Image: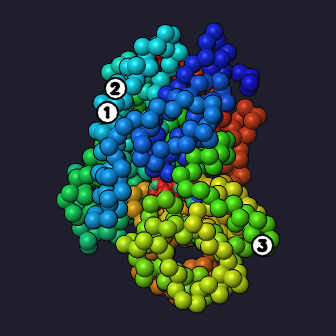
Amino acid sequence: QEEGNTATGGLRRRRVLVFPLPYQGHINPMFQLAGLLHARGFAITVFHAHFNAPDPSRHPAYDFVPLPDGMSAACTDDTAEPAVIATIKNIFAVNTSCEASFRERLAALLEAPGARDDVACLIADAHLLTLVDVARQQGVPTLALRTGSAACFRCFLANPMLCDKGYLPAQESQLDTPVRELPPYRVRDLMAISRNREEHDLTCKLLSRAVEAARTSTGFILNTFDALETDELATVRQDLGLPVFDVGPLHKISPAASSSILPQDRACLEWLDAQAPSVLYVSFGSLANMSGADLAEMAWGIANAGQPFLWVLRSDLVRGAARVTLPDGFDAVTRERGMVVEWAPQEEVLAHGAVGGFWTHGGWNSTLEGVCGGVPMLCRPYFGDQMGNARYVELVWRTGLALEGELERSKVEEAIRRLMRSEEGGRMRERAQELKRRAAEAITDDAAGSSLLSIDKLVNHILSLSL
Ligand code: UDX
């Protein structure tokens, strides 16, 4: 048991209830957070939807409460709509379909002898406002975890203003207009840019509900660290007027391999062991997808750049295709200097010394994992917060570059060469190494690490809560 403020330091063991949004990029940080609270002595109960359900056998110390959600049909039948709309609708569907069962199961849990003394709070994903409301109605204090960056949440807070000022919904001719209020964003980097009215309205609703989940909670948790987003964190703190806990990079404090939905192919770590430190790691997270034509351009760009590569090709990466097929002749390139896997142990891959660059879609977890790996990043954002994350990589931290516009093999080849072999890429690498040091400092155990201090404050905050 660690010293200092722990949940068992007092007379009884306190319990934290958590409710992740059932997507990989949200499940990982919630389990990482649960892991660190468990290490501080809290008991953990995980409420979860059936869709993308966690495997309890991989977390024997936790209690699990699966909720009938009627979700699987809605969540898997998303081929008819763009991934963004389908995902947003699914997020709302998790809220509504879990509401009644969550109310029932939470009430049952609270009726158990002593439970009202033991349960400290619910930590819910910020996209689960309905469930945050249910908990509060039953007297359970809540905290909201937002799994994106502070900069991204600042955009959530600013969204009504951006609509009032006419930035949104975006006009085609305005896409490259800088958003003066939120540098370095352009209009095209914002989340609610769609001119399709339904998509615009759905996105605005998604953002305002996340803000409400934060505002109606007792505290707000972000997977980031102070040195990475000092000003952005200050703005979020000022605007929310709540305790804001910057506890990242969570994966460095509490790894999440055990919450991976897909099996991770660990053979690639052995392959990396045999490589020089120049491998380009390519992975687009759990949701982004692309056309077959883009995949072919990517493949030939990677081949022509001549760099060793480790490429994650999720079986559903190509829109409308049941499996991923690489162009004829690409096999020979892979045999010569690459490896292709369906899903990798990404946190370990990015911490591996042989990885010298990361081509990413710019999901926030991937971005943070890349920061902690100290590698320069090539960002090809697809949707949501990814465009904004790419802007920060390119223009704020200057640890990588964005690949925009049509995906063409010559552009891909040139971007990889710039990243991996140019002087400019070398400077990006130096800055990436510096950020890696700052990330390590945030979690150093000498009482000065900003995130560890924030975790102490979070633990004290949770211990101060009562039903
Ligand atoms: C989504 C959004 O796209 C993202 O922008 C948002 O910030 C969170 O939700 P996702 O697209 O999956 O997430 O990207 P990301 O946030 O990077 O999360 C992916 C997670 O899957 C990472 O923790 C990564 O380590 C893990 N992963 C990825 C693997 O374990 N293996 C892989 O091969 C690829």
Residue at image position (73%, 32%) is 447
The residue that mark 1 highlights is: 99
Q: Secondary structure at mark 2?
A: helix
The residue that mark 2 highlights is: 103
Residue at image position (44%, 64%) is 288
Q: Which label lies toward us, 1 or 3?
A: 1
Amino acid type indicated by mark 3: Gln
Q: Quadrant of residue 356?
A: bottom right
Labels 1 & 2 near each other (Cβ < 8 A): yes
In this view, which residue lies farthest toward the left?
Answer: 197
Give the colouring mode of the picture. Answer: rainbow
Residue at image position (49%, 28%) is 17
Circle nearer the N terminus (1, 3): 1
| Near-viewer residue (57 or 1) | 57
| Near-viewer residue (270 or 9) | 270
| Near-viewer residue (51 or 42) | 51
Q: Position of residue 74 (x, y in %)?
A: 31, 52
Q: CA distance from mark 1 to mark 3?
A: 50 Å
Would you call the spot at circle 2 few (<14 residues within 10 Å), some (14-19), or many (20 or more)?
some
Circle nearer the N terminus (3, 2): 2
Labels 1 & 3 near each other (Cβ < 8 A): no
* In the image: residue 316, left or right of residue 360: left
Amino acid type indicated by mark 2: Arg
Q: CA distance from mark 3 to mark 2?
A: 52 Å
Q: Position of residue 187 (x, y in %)?
A: 34, 63
In the rendered view of the protein, which quadrant contains the C terminus? top left
Mark on residue 43? none
Mark on residue 275? 3
Q: Position of residue 182 (x, y in %)?
A: 40, 54
